[in-house]
Image (cartoon, rainbow, N blue to C red):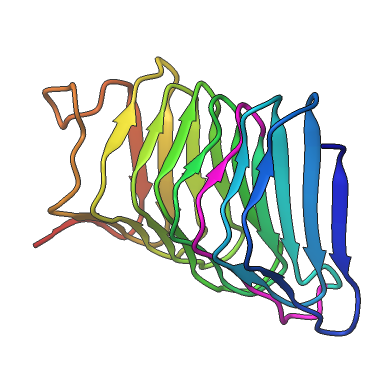
């Protein structure tokens, strides 16, 4: 399985990932999906031999049109996962399991919403830094790596899911002028107050609310 770049380069071209991709042999590799328009689909991406770092780049011409909408599971065997769109929404509903790789999410402009399914990264970090008033919706994080989740004024929602943060490094959720919303279905195993086993910082100018 050599490294591959899959590019759709028209004005608003779309990449549809509607079949499974499995890496079952070979050394470490990279897989990049890059489109001037959308990247979407339900296929799973899995590596069982060597690491597989996967990048999704929508709206690669910064035209303001190009979302990411993925429902399949991504398992990288230690590889990194990055998702970026210039201005449109990013949404994953499957589980991203990096086995030690990092998860990085970025938007360069606009105020679209980011929604992520469960993230499992072992010792890999989670780095989500959005530059504007973007809302961020999370559905669970399991990591012993550092966590940084920031938006400049949108809301950060810890949706129903499990948040196991076991690193001695600080986990930071920073909504700046926005709010941090914690659903009643959220659990933080292994700790007494409030249920997190690593130091956590929730920074807001808005407020912290428990939804119920």
Residue 156 in the figure: left or right of residue 145: left
Taking the view exactly as shown, the residue that stands out farthest to the top is: 168
* Residue lying at the far front of the rendered structure: 24
Image-based side of 84 in relation to 121, left or right: right
Residue under the point 58% across and 60% down = 43
Quadrant the N terminus occupies: top right
- Between 88 and 1, the one nearer to me in the picture: 1
Residue 88: within the magenta? no
Residue at the farthest right position? 9
Q: Work out whether residue 134 or residue 36 is closer to the camera in this orientation and state it.
A: 36
Residue 167 locus on image (x, y percent): 41, 18
Q: Residue at x 21, y 34 (%)?
A: 188
Task: Give the magenta range.
Answer: 62-79
| Most common secondary structure along the magenta stretch | loop
Task: State which quadrant residue 110 falls in.
Answer: bottom right
Q: Who's the residue at 71% across and 24% down the image?
A: 50
64, above or below 209, in the image: below
Relative vertical location of residue 24 with respect to residue 89 in this rendering, above or below: above
Q: Residue at x 33, y 41 (%)?
A: 202
Please state the horizontal and vertical placement of residue 62, each as a whole percent of the image: 81, 73
Number of numbered tags placed on the structure image: 0
Q: Position of residue 63 (x, y in %)?
A: 81, 80
Quadrant placement of the C terminus = bottom left
- Based on the picture, tell me whether residue 74 belongs to the magenta stretch: yes
């Amino acid at each position: 399985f050599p490294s591959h770049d899959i590019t759709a380069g028209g004005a608003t071209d779309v990449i549809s990932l509607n079949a499974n991709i499995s890496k079952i042999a070979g050394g470490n590799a990279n897989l990049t999906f890059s489109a001037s328009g959308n990247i979407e689909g339900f296929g799973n991406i899995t590596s069982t031999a060597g690491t597989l770092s996967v990048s999704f780049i929508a709206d690669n011409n910064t035209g303001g049109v190009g979302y990411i909408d993925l429902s399949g599971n991504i398992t990288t065997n230690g590889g990194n996962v990055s998702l970026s769109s210039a201005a449109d929404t990013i949404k994953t509903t499957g589980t991203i399991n990096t086995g030690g790789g990092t998860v990085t999410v970025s938007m360069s402009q606009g105020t679209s919403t980011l929604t992520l399914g469960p993230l499992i990264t072992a010792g890999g970090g989670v780095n989500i830094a959005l530059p504007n008033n973007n809302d961020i919706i999370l559905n669970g994080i399991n990591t012993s790596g550092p966590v940084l989740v920031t938006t400049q004024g949108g809301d950060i929602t810890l949706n129903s899911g499990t948040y196991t943060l076991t690193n001695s490094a600080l986990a930071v959720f920073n909504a700046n002028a926005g709010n941090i919303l914690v659903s009643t279905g959220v659990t933080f195993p292994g700790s007494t107050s409030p249920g997190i086993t690593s130091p956590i910082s929730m920074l807001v100018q808005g407020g912290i609310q428990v939804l119920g």
